[in-house]
Amino acid sequence: MDIKLEIPEFIRKRCQKSAQPVLVYLLGLVGVLVIAASLWLQFSDARATQDAAAAQEQGRVVLQQMVGPVRSLSELFSDPAVQDLAVEALESTDTEALLDWLQERQPGIQSVRLLAAEEIDSIDPDELGPNGYALLDLAMAVLEGKRSQMQVHQAIQPMMLYDGRPIEHEGEAVGAVIFAVDPAVVIGPFEPE
């Protein structure tokens, strides 16, 4: 019988769980750190999402500020009155009335150059100035029906922004109008005060 009593006592001592208080505290500390880390990650993710949304909104505003002046220039040259003045100026080689009319509506326009479609292949780019090749390429692209791209020319001083549109008469492109615009018209909203 003595043996029977010793075995259960032995088993009872072996099965008895004991934990040291240091391990309990350490486990609690690890749990608190895991919770704190998950909260920090959630906060930083929310902050990054807010920053991305703010940057996207800022980009949209900047794009609208840039597109506005470009769109107004495009609409200006689509006006039938401009087309009529350009046809007259192309025939008379006097661009003064056209330039005055354009500057009244868009003060940033600095100069206008008209190139006749039938003469475009015989034009010497050097006659157009230091940026003659670029202007001729712009005029040819416009006459081929390609959408022209605004170009910044730094070869001349002061630096100018150039664009072109076709001159249409009775549904046919009879020439190209190349105009120089002060870059401040487009980039003005981006300059710091």
Image (cartoon, helix red, strand yellow):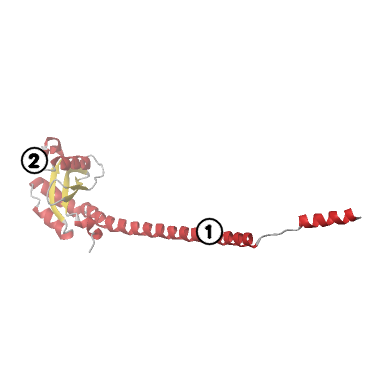
Residue 42, x across and y down, in percent: 50, 59
Residue at left 8%, top 47%? Answer: 92
The residue positioned farthest toward the top in the image shown: 122
In the rendered structure, the answer to whether residue 140 lies left or right of residue 41 reads: left
Give the amino acid type for the residue marked by disc 2 in the picture: Glu
Of the numbered discs 2 and 1, the one sitting upstream in the chain is 1
Q: Is residue 16 left or right of residue 40?
A: right
Name the spot of residue 172 as percent of width and height, x first: 21, 42
Judging depth in this view, the residue of 172 and 139 nearest the camera is 139
Measure how far apart labels 2 and 1 are at the Cα level: 70 Å
Where residue 53 appears, as percent x and y from the top left, is 41, 58
Residue at the right extreme, as displayed:
1
Task: Using the rendered view, name the quadrant where residue 75 is placed.
Answer: bottom left
Q: Residue furthest bottom?
A: 193
Residue 185 — which label?
Answer: none
**Which picture quadrant has residue 100?**
bottom left
Q: Secondary structure at mark 2?
A: helix
Which amino acid lies under the numbered mark 1 shown in the image of this protein? Ser
Decide: few, some or many residues near mark 1? Use Cα within 10 Å; few <14, some 14-19, many ≥20: few
Residue located beneath label 1 in the image:
38
**Residue 73 image-quadrant placement:** bottom left
Return the residue found at the far front.
Answer: 2
Residue 108 against residue 125 in the figure, above or below = below
Q: Quadrant of the C terminus?
A: bottom left
Q: In terms of depth relative to the viewer, which is nearer, 156 or 96?
A: 156
Q: Secondary structure at mark 1?
A: helix
Check the picture and name the quadrant holding the N terminus: bottom right
Between marks 2 and 1 in the image, the one whose residue lies nearer the viewer: 1
Q: Which residue position is annotated with label 2? A: 127
